[in-house]
Amino acid sequence: MLPLMCQAERLAALSLCLVLACREAPTVAPARPAASISDASHSAGNPHFHFLPPLVPQPSFTGTFDGTFAPVVRICAWDGSRCVLPLVAEFTTAAGPGSETVRLDPLGELYVVNWKSGDFQLDPTQTYRISVLVGRTELGFADVDVVSSRRELRNVQAGEYVGLVDGLTLPIKFRIERRAMCGSDAACVEAAVGAAGGTVGTDRAGVAIPSGAVDHDIHLAVRRRDPQPCLPLTVLQAGGCYEVLTDQAAGFTLQVPATVGICADAAEPGAALQLGKVEPDDPAQEVVLLDVATADFLQCGAAPSAGGLTRSFSYVAPTMNGAWFAQSSTPRVRAVATALQGVQLHHLYLDDRDATAVLITGGFDALGNPSSSAELVSINSNVGPLVSIPVGDLITARWGHTAVRLAGGRVLVAGGLGPDPTCAMADAEIYDPTTRTFVPTGGMNVARTRHTATRLLDGRVLIAGGITGCAVSPPAIASAEIYDPATGQFTLTAPMLNLRERHTATLLPDGRVWVAGGDGGAVSGNPTAQPVALASTELFIPTTGGGYFTQATALRYPRYRHSATYLPISSGRAGSPAVLVAGGTTGTVVHNIGEVACMDGNISPVCTQVIPLAVGVEDHVARLSGGSNVLIVGGATDPAGTASRATQWVRDGYPLQTFAPPAMATARDGHTAMHIYGNRLLVVGGFSGSMIATTREVFSFQ
């Protein structure tokens, strides 16, 4: 029979600014987004793209005109950050409103399309934008101020807006030069390829188009997308490390597959690399692994290389296929995995990585009895089975506890439920790696389980929240205390602002801890009382003697039994670190959404995103793996505790995207996991439906 609280857990889960109004009477003009013109002469825009009169004064240029492009002109309402759909108008070389099309003037060395503004019902309070694109590459844009009379043109802010009298026709003229798709990127390579085929790229990345792949000239550009090292990953980080661009419309494909090739900057010795790509027009943003091909046009030297066949172009990067491997293991639920030997607390990731040994402690067995069992899982190489090394038992059998690595490889084990499955414990003990035994240490001031334990930057450990006492449904608590390894003692510190249990506590780079969500706690002794899912968050500010909590911006969705994963600084988030909060439950609904709180210096969200998950889960594990991507493993898909085999990647970048890699062999929730040596993830124990998993699994990123 399972412990009572365990049973309760499983039952609970481009821009035109129009001014059409009469300006004879003094009025207060509506606020408008900041306006701009972007081309070679304005706003440090694309040096190979020029707007021409009458939009702007006659520019000077030295580049070579290219009349072989098929540009698109889009006009949209502009809200200051993006186009408001639907578009006002879109003109191509083949079609457009009123039979207007984008035309080539070879003698004038320009492209032109006439926009008859009187044919459109325009909102005088809106800002609008004209954008010129080739394929999905925006070459430039212009914000236009539409006025009611020629006299009012004098009020238009030249250099910011283009002036246009409402109802008149605006000739949109522009010049596209060679290397327009590359813009100011000197390392980018651009060329036109026709029916005879050809190769475009550098020695380290490129694409070979075979004869017969196209029946007309197309433009291709190959450029580095990510300034970070181009590393082989199971998931393309921020859209891959190279980008292959064309001037063709979305949906364009080659008639014969082309060969794409990339030299990787590094790889594990002997790793079999394969190219993956992300389709920019695919809403699912799933990674497609390309059929392996030899890229003879590359000159990688000693660097590893990857080649692949493709009929379309996108973000590409070398990848290493991932797979799950299972081993038999001691059946246990809610054990805790703690990284030991070889661990590095990376200054970017704030995460234990490259552990060569993992300590597994406690949990409960198939009969519901708390376990005193502990084992050391040794990882000696990138290949071969993991080795279990017996260690001394815990002094006190327990589950629902925390286990945090201290300096020197020691581990602090604190709290949980012991021999009495309804009573939280204050007991704590230390794992000594030199003797592989557990020794006593000072007990906590408050007995607790379902709490959090967070190692601070100075080596102390913050213990926060949880439930306490002896009852079928004890209340949540706000109590917090700090363990000092130097003295072996716990000291109470200022409590949290909210009662919380099954919340998360995430260490931030400046040493503060972000506490998010949780269950506010049921009425003591009432096992049928509904959980109180929290959206509130708070920050722990460490001080010399202890610390205190301050209120922070709330989550959009209340949740508990969720995960919170620190994401390192990303160029996609304008240099801001973030925390990914994923899944969880309200007690009646399991969330299939995640939210990303990007943090400024005050740790208040400044670029919050909401993202769909591939599968809604709670009581899962989320670990930062494969670069700065998050792997979410297993979890329950409903409040009744239906365990899932699902794994899902949340790929770093802006916006973040999710997709599903290979599923585990065994469905599980209530499991534990740790990132280990060789870019792998170890998963141990958990429920598998009504049973307990009898295997551990390793996801290998190679």
Image (cartoon, rainbow, N blue to C red):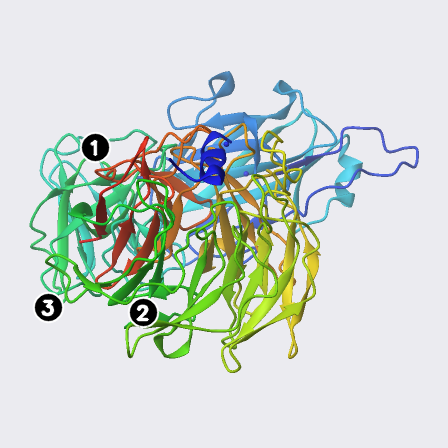
Q: Residue 301 bears which disc, if any?
A: 3
User: Which labelled disc corresponds to residue 409?
Assistant: none
Q: Badge 1, how many Cα within 10 Å: few under 14, some, many 20+?
A: few
Q: Residue at x 65, y 21 (%)?
A: 118
Q: Residue at x 47, y 49 (%)?
A: 420
Q: Where is the C terminus found, in terms of image quarters?
A: bottom left
Q: Amino acid at mark 2?
A: Leu
* Residue 212 x/y as whole percent: 10, 33
Residue identifier under label 2: 340
Would residue 205 appear left or right of 339 to someone viewing this image?
left
In front of the other: 642 or 615: 642
Residue of label 1: 216
The secondary structure type at the circle numbered 1 is loop
Q: Nearer the viewer, mark 2 or mark 1?
A: 2
**167 is higher (above) or lower (below) than 189:** above
User: Label 3 amino acid?
Assistant: Gly
Q: Label 3 to label 1, Cα distance in Å? A: 35 Å
- Closest to the observer: 35 or 579? 579
Depth check: give the residue in front, 188 or 562.
562
* Residue 545 horizontal side relative to residue 591, left or right: right
